[in-house]
């Protein structure tokens, strides 16, 4: 037969004893660390055996060098003692933080148990319902505090709003309107899926550039998913052609190639194109207005031929990712360049490689 479950009073007593024990441990660590700091920061008195004179040497220090100006171990202190004290000092710092966290969680649990116990002592169904509600509120509050203090992932770029967003404590999106009804892990129209498809590229375009068969499928899927009813097709086409140069539409374009190599002194380098740029638009060619691989290939070749023959430039839009804050975050922005195809010292008219 299993033992009976402890009552609320028993749980309350056990929690108080646990908190008292943690408080005593914390106090002991405080006394120990104060003694260590005092010994490490106090000047050292050295007594000479011959002349019975005393001299004062600098303290061992908490983080000061244990060697002299010539790089030799200091002869006026106990090196082993200094290292042992410093090691223990850092251990106490870690243990102290852990204790503080346990005490904080214990106080929250104690508050829940105290409210539950006071509700039970009042009696009645209303009292029990109120106690359950208060207990749930306290538990939810404790869970929210833990979630808010948990490490957060890196910020993400939201292609829908064109803004940087961060993850809220409940998994929603912070930093944009109506972010509370969206999920940070499932940003709609994210560029990550397109980038994953582009990374597997492998078919030839024009003068030595390549695009994948998987990319063709991705473009076909993107084209079919963006179809509209027949009644609005004409209006959408006119709107797309009239706002091609707008920033919002450029951001919403789906990449159809990655520039994985830019040659030195080439037209692409002179235009400002960099390796790793995602190609969104090449002249009038985009993934939206060309639904298949053959169409994209013919359109790019046509754009190059016309621009080279007329000695004019081609407007190119790319999506560029730049690391920020030492790699903690990434900035994704859209850049537009005027690229003039021409003969140069290398092969082709562009001097870059698409994948």
Image: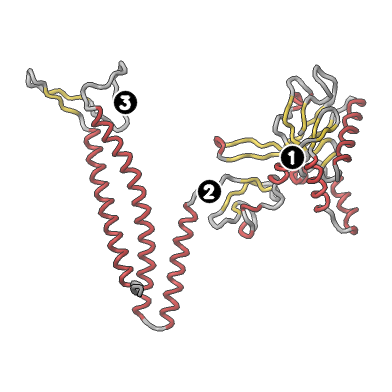
Looking at the image, the residue that sits furthest to the front is: 1
Q: Which residue is mark 2?
A: 152
Q: Are marks 2 and 1 in contact (CB under 8 Å)?
A: no
Q: How many marks?
A: 3
Q: Residue at x 39, y 67 (%)?
A: 112
Q: Secondary structure at mark 1?
A: helix
Q: Quadrant of the N terminus?
A: bottom left
Which circle marks residue 114 in the picture? none
As drawn, is 37 to the left or to the right of 203? left
As drawn, is 2 to the left or to the right of 75? right
Q: Which residue is mark 3?
A: 65
Q: Which residue is mark 1?
A: 198
Q: Secondary structure at mark 2?
A: loop
Q: Quadrant of the C terminus?
A: top right
Q: Residues within 10 Å of mark 1 (few under 14, many from 20)?
A: many
Measured Cα–Cα span from mark 1 to mark 3: 53 Å
Q: Is residue 117 visible?
A: no
Quarter of the image for residue 324 reads top right
Measured Cα–Cα span from mark 3 to mark 2: 37 Å
């Amino acid at each position: 037969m299993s033992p009976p479950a402890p009552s609320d009073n028993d749980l309350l007593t056990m929690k108080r004893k646990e908190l008292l024990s943690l408080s005593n441990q914390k106090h002991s660590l405080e006394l120990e660390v104060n003694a260590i700091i005092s010994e490490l920061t106090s000047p050292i008195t050295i007594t000479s055996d011959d002349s019975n004179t005393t001299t004062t040497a600098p303290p061992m220090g908490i983080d000061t060098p244990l060697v002299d100006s010539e790089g030799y171990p200091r002869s006026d202190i106990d090196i082993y003692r200094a290292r042992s004290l410093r090691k223990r000092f850092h251990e106490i710092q870690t243990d102290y933080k852990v204790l503080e966290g346990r005490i904080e969680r214990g106080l929250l649990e104690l508050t829940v148990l105290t409210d539950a116990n006071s509700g039970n002592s009042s009696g009645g169904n209303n009292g029990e319902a109120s106690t359950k509600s208060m207990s749930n509120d306290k538990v939810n509050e404790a869970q929210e505090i833990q979630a808010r203090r948990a490490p957060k992932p890196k910020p993400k770029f939201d292609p829908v709003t064109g803004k940087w967003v961060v993850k809220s404590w409940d998994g929603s999106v912070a930093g944009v309107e109506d972010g509370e009804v969206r999920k940070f892990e499932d940003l709609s129209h994210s560029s990550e899926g397109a980038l994953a498809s582009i990374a597997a590229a492998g078919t030839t375009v024009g003068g030595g550039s390549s695009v994948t068969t998987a990319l063709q499928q991705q473009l076909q899927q993107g084209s079919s998913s963006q179809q509209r009813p027949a009644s609005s097709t004409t209006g959408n086409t006119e709107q797309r052609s009239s706002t091609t140069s707008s920033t919002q539409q450029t951001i919403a374009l789906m990449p159809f190639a990655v520039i994985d190599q830019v040659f030195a002194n080439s037209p692409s380098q002179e235009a400002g194109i960099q390796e790793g740029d995602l190609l969104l638009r090449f002249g009038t060619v985009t993934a939206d207005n060309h639904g298949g691989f053959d169409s994209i290939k013919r359109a790019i070749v046509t754009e190059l031929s016309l621009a080279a023959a007329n000695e004019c430039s081609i407007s190119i839009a790319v999506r560029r990712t730049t690391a920020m804050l030492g790699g903690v975050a990434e900035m994704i922005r859209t850049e537009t360049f005027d690229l003039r195809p021409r003969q140069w010292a290398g092969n082709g008219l562009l001097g870059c490689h698409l994948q």
